[in-house]
Amino acid sequence: MRSTHAHAVLLAALAFTATACQSIAGPSAELPAPKIDLPAASPGEVRTAIFAGGCFWCTEAVFEHVKGVTNVVSGYAGGSKETATYEQSNTGTSGHAEVIKITYDASQITYAQLLHVFFDAHEPTRLNAQGPDTGTQYRAAIFYENADQKRVAEAYVAQLNAAKVFDAPVVTSLEDLSKSGFYLAEEYHQNYAAAHPDQGYVRANVPKKLQKLKDRHAALYVERAIKP
């Protein structure tokens, strides 16, 4: 059985992570669709994408409702395997960011379309901060897996900056996944919003993000989350 002290520490850690979910990002105007995308996929071709947008509970919840997405898991990227834990990443000194790994059917949804949703799901002009939370662990980042993903992401960032849809330049970083790797987060972080729909912060914040997904990406929204 977990000790009383350890239990209290865990509850405090969960509460702290939850505060990163409290901001709904993006400008009032709709974002332009990306002009550049990856090469077309064959039917049923499975690909992955790794994004950091602050609290991974909230970004996971959004992408669980996106058409063509077959799985979303929370994890860490940007640091070493040895420091890929919530306790160490939460210090802001491990190099890790809270990320989600999206597995998707590339014949149903494209990488550029995922980027389009992602830039509506986080605050891309805030450096090392999302909502009320600050620190490199909450930085906004695209962890590209290959040169094609890097090319598409760079092009979209440039397109958004040129269109001046935000009040400040995009600071969402592009980071090479091969320099760190992806590490799965602890089990209690997985599918958190769907597993705890009655938690106060989930009720207050996740529905707003899902409504934004419905409003701005109606053709990509699916009502039922991919995980029960």
Image (spheres, rainbow, N blue to C red):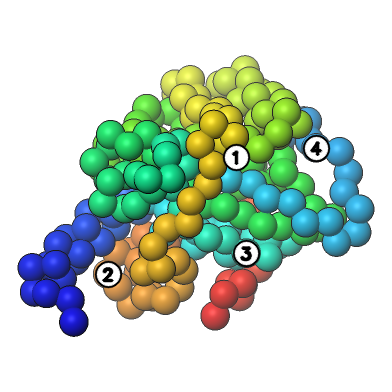
Give the foreground label among 1 and 4: 4
Categorize mark 3 by other alpha carbons within 10 Å: few (<14), some (14-19), many (20+). some
Q: Earlier in the sequence, mark 2 or mark 3?
A: 3
Residue 76 lies left or right of residue 135; in this view the side is right
Q: Which mark is residue 200?
A: 2
Look at label 2 and name its amino acid: Gly
Point out residue 76 in the picture as x, y percentages from the top left corner.
44, 47
Look at label 4 and name its amino acid: Leu
Q: Earlier in the sequence, mark 1 or mark 2?
A: 1
Examine the image and state in which quarter residue 164 appears.
top right
Nearest to the observer: residue 35 or residue 155: 155
- Residue under circle 3? 71
Q: Which mark is residue 38?
A: 4
Most distant residue in the right direction: 42
| Residue at x 76%, y 31% (from the top left corner) | 148
- Residue under circle 1? 30
Examine the image and state in which quarter residue 165 appears.
top right
Q: Earlier in the sequence, mark 3 or mark 1?
A: 1
Q: Earlier in the sequence, mark 2 or mark 4?
A: 4
Give the foreground label among 2 and 4: 4
Point out residue 192 in the picture as x, y percentages from the top left corner.
40, 68
Most distant residue in the top direction: 162
Look at label 3 and name its amino acid: Asn
Could you tell me if residue 55 is visible in this image? yes
Q: Which mark is residue 220?
A: none
Q: CA distance from mark 3 to mark 1?
A: 26 Å
Residue 159, relative to residue 28: is it above or below? above
